[in-house]
Amino acid sequence: MREEAAKDVLRRLKTVEGHVRGIARMVEEGDATYAEVVQQTNAVFSALRRINTVLLKDFVQERAERDGASEELAQDLIKAIDRVVR
């Protein structure tokens, strides 16, 4: 994994970690509705999907560079990833 992607993934994971702790507090305190907890867990799922997208894009870029693929091919694949994950 390239250094820039690793930093981005770690930052995002720490954010998710904090978010999950916040959800746990909501549940422990017992003042949150089911809808509020579900909304927050969905936000965590979305954040994890975004992390996977960062990883997949970095994988494509890294492999393209390593295997000598053109930058155009790498960018086309990254654009396709963006279209699929929307």
Image: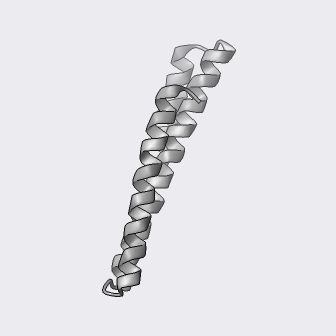
- Quarter occupied by the N terminus: top right
| Residue at image coords 64%, 23% | 63
Left-right relation of 85 to 15: right
Question: x%, y% of residue 39?
Answer: 37, 72
Image height of 66 relative to 79, above or below: above
The answer to whether residue 86 is visible is no
Observer able to see residue 65? yes
Lateral position of residue 50 relative to residue 29, left or right: right
Q: Position of residue 24 (x, y in %)?
A: 43, 74
Q: Which residue corresponds to the image point at 36% horizontal and 78% vertical from the top-left?
A: 26
Q: Residue 20 placed where, x, y %?
A: 44, 65
Q: How many circles with numbers are drawn on the protein?
A: 0
Q: Is residue 24 above or below residue 70?
A: below
Q: How is the image coloured?
A: one colour
Residue at the extreme right: 67
Residue in the foreground of this view, choosing between 19 and 40:
19
- Residue at 49 percent of width and 24 percent of height: 75
